[in-house]
Amino acid sequence: MRKIRIGWASVSITPDRPVLMLGQMYHRVSEYVRDPLTATALALDNGESQAVFVSLDMTEPPLGLEDRLRASLSDLEGFDVGCISMGATHTHSSTDFNRDFLRDDNEAVFGADILPPLEMDPEVLWGGEAQAFLLERLSDVIRRAWEGRTEGGVSSVQEYAVTGFNRRATFAADGRSETVMYGDCSRAEFTGFENGADSGVGLLYTWDKKGALTGVVINVSTPSQVFELHRFLTADFWAFVREDVRSSLGSVHVLALCGAAGDVNPVDLVRVSRENKEALRIWGGQTGEVYRNFDMTRLCAGIGRRVGDAVRRGLSEARAFIDYAPAFAHRVLELSLPLRQVTQAEYEEAAEEIARIRSTHSADRRMTMEEVVRAFEPQGVVLRYRQQQEEQTVQVRSHVVRIGDAALATNPFELFHAYGLRMKARTPAKPLMVVQLSNGLGGYLPTQAAIEGGSYSSKAASTQCGPEGGDRLVEETVRAVCGLFR
């Protein structure tokens, strides 16, 4: 086996100006910074294979930067830009440093003339200027991680910590069951949740030649969305995880990876429903900012401590099994998954609703932001119908990497956690870290049970692929991971 070389780097991606925020359907511009947004890069290389993983405190991975990033790193000796995997922690209190793609979709269906005007202050960082800001920092952090590689070792551990809960509550309705995302569990009709959650914590530790810890990769199947809905920038619970880990282990690097968590949220709906009945209605509708009756800072601190405890528990085991020449291999899968279809009848119903909305508004009587949000579903059906006239597949790039006993497998979806469990159960990796929202934006990928239950995150408007695509993604990922262990 060849010796492994490891490089780490981090950089702040916190803007010094207000920024266009994403994560909710209503328009938001940041008002202040609660804690820094960070980009962290881990570079791995053994002379035969290489991989660079970048974790970003962003709502979604950056899009449209690949060619410019390739050009900016073209002078790096021996470096293959195609081995970069970029993922987002999916904080809803950040941005994608780009345009407002929801507004673009709104205009594609309704036209700009009846939408609410959005006049942003010139100080707001967005669009091309925001992309240049992010590109500079991405190039810097990847370059420093690659150039800083030195011989070291790795060890991996599977640990556990409660970080998230299923957010798709089920209710008895006329002899059947229906699902409501962020449903009020204090209702008498509440029967449980559509599925569970994954409390696994996948850990990969890196060490220098003398056996000193240099960094840790942490994979939890929960999006960082405790502080969502408001108008400040924050890395959410990952800020607390980093602080907790470094308080006991020193200034080590932390690569934060969001696992399969399309149906998971860090808020325990059962325990907060009674005091948040009206807030849950607004939260689920995504029509505006809402203040919920629980201590968000305390919740984040608790997640930080639990994940930090898992890291420390795993560390005592990991120290005894450091591998300085681990098996290391990297495959990039280019997959064509079936595009989820809408029927002619669904399209006609949605188009009729769009026509009704247009007929009741004009340049002098524009839609409100609440009306735009409520039109998300028929708008999405119309856009999908247009899309399926041109294409029938979704192109997906997945990075599959073995490093010692562990493996990482990426995907661009908000992947319902059951798909991640299926991958983990069928591969020999210890652990398998399934990493969602990487190298593209695929929308939610729901299960069949979720589609039957209904509600946001399972309907065509918020998905690109359905269960058939999920099954294919599982099979291709399992095949690729197992192939690296033969």
Image (cartoon, rainbow, N blue to C red):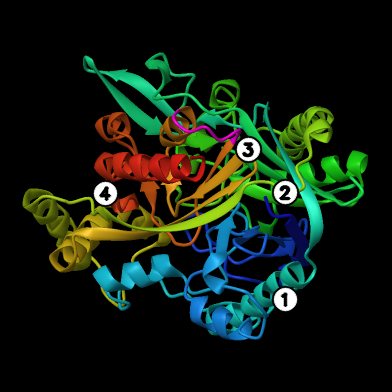
Q: Is 167 placed left or right of 379 in the picture? A: right
Badge nearest the viewer, 3 or 4: 3
Labelled pair 3, 4 in contact (Cβ < 8 Å): no
C-alpha separation, residue under disc 2 versus residue under disc 1: 28 Å
Q: Look at 61% across and 61% down and name the residue there.
A: 51
Of the residues shown, which amino acid type is indicated by label 3?
Asp
Q: Secondary structure at mark 1?
A: helix
Percent across and percent down for residue 3 are 74, 54
Element class at badge 3: loop
Marks 2 & 3, CB-CB < 8 Å contact:
no
The residue that mark 3 highlights is 405
Residue 25 placement, left or right of 157: left
Q: Looking at the image, is mark 3 or mark 1 earlier in the sequence? A: 1
Q: What residue is pinned by disc 2?
A: 325
Q: Which mark is residue 140?
A: 1
Circles 4 and 1, Cβ within 8 Å, touching? The answer is no
Q: Which amino acid does the dot numbered 1 rest on?
A: Asp
Q: Nearer the viewer, mark 2 or mark 1?
A: 2
Part of the protein shown in magenta: 426-431
In the image, 479 versus 249, the foreground residue is 479
Q: Tell how many labels.
A: 4
Lateral position of residue 340 relative to residue 424, left or right = left
Residue named by callout 4: 460
Give the structural element (helix, strand or loop) at label 4: helix
Please report the residue visible at 71 percent of the width from the left and 68 percent of the height from the top: 13
